[in-house]
Image (cartoon, grey):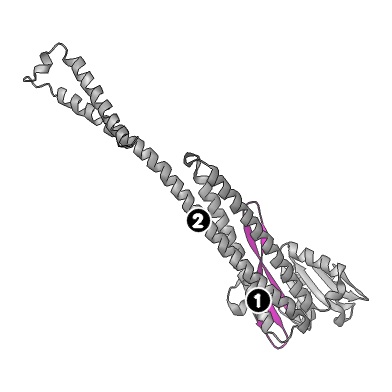
Amino acid sequence: MITIFYKSHDSIVSEVDEEILKQIDYEDLLWVDLMDATEHENGRVEEFFGVNIQTRQQAEEIESSSRYSETDALIIANSSFLIPSTETYFSEPTSFQLKDGILISTRNRELRSFGDTQRKLSHNPKAYPTGYHIFVALFETRIDMDADMLENIARGITQLSKRINLAKPEDIDQKVILEINTLQENTMLIRENIIDKQRILSGVLKSERFPRDVFPKLQVMIKDTNSLINHADFSFDRLDYLQDTFLGLANIHLNKITKTFTVASVIFMPPTLIASIYGMNFAAMPELQWKIGYPFAIVVMILSSLTTIIIFKLKKLL
């Protein structure tokens, strides 16, 4: 699908019709958004603007030159936008090209940041006179969404921390460590995504083609990305602390179980020794002919166990 945004009097109009490209003035064009476009639609845009639409593989490359580059007539930027799912996020590569102040974006999925930016265009068209301004607005919206994602992660960490602090050691199970692992993975994905945006914004700041009036906003966005990276690092530290706490509580519970079995084994060691001695059945053992030999052995075994228990009590091992 092709959505074309262009200036019409004092507003910005959008049309889902590729034929509109030939019907409006080139100078009025602002943004051509290709969302899950067909080969025919990509070909029409390539022919009209004289560009090569980036493939998904090119958009996913991580080299710095692949994330942001400039040629004599074109600016190319590739970035990944996160999409939240039930428990995690997945990354959707997007590609941007700027030619003659017109933005050409390529993506395969519906992205909330694009929808939010499109609403901004309709509400305040004068703030977006060129595709450069729309490009910056897209990343500004995306950074705000990344901040919201980090806040959700922080809330999840706080809730998990309260559960661990209020739980008894025996109530801690493997679900907790799996939740911690999920939060760590999500934080890592968001952090990588923010760093990706930071690299592109750094390239834009060095560019001489972007209008001067967007640079104050770009500098604020760079500061925001730095703050978000620090926030993500802090979340990592909190998750490491929770993981250590979980492992500590799990070890305490395991030590209690081991201690119980150890004490039980020691308590039954003296009776076992006595039973072993009287179970030898040697002929020279006088107790075998003793009428009270059996109850005597039982009493001795009980007393030995009680003595062991008393010693453990005195040593505060029980």
Query: Dividing the picture into quarters, in which one does residue 230 lie?
Result: bottom right
Side of 180 relative to 132 (left or right): left
Residue matched to label 2: 241
Whole-percent x and y of residue 236?
A: 54, 60
Whole-percent x and y of residue 255?
A: 38, 42
Instruction: Say if the magenta span includes residue 38.
Output: no
Q: Earlier in the sequence, mark 1 or mark 2?
A: 1
Give, as a three-letter code, the residue at label 1: Ile
Residue matched to label 1: 200
Query: Dividing the picture into quarters, in which one does residue 307 lie?
Result: top left
Magenta part of the chain = 69-97
- Furthest residue in direction right, as rendered: 9
Q: Secondary structure at mark 1?
A: helix
At x 87%, y 67%, the residue is 123
At x 53%, y 47%, the residue is 176
Query: From the image, which quarter does the C terminus lie in?
Result: top left
Q: What secondary structure prevails in the magenta region?
A: strand
Query: From the image, which quarter does the N terminus lie in?
Result: bottom right
Q: Residues within 10 Å of mark 1 (few under 14, many from 20)?
A: many
Can residue 53 be seen by looking at this rendering? no
Do the residues under discs 1 and 2 have CB atoms within 8 angstroms? no
Q: Residues within 10 Å of mark 2 (few under 14, many from 20)?
A: few
Cα separation, mark 1 vs mark 2, equals: 33 Å
Vertical placement of residue 241 versus 70, above or below: above
Give, as a three-letter code, the residue at label 2: Tyr
Whole-percent x and y of residue 265?
A: 29, 33
Seen from the viewer's position, the closer of residues 308 and 276 is 308
Residue 261, disc: none
At x 78%, y 76%, the residue is 133
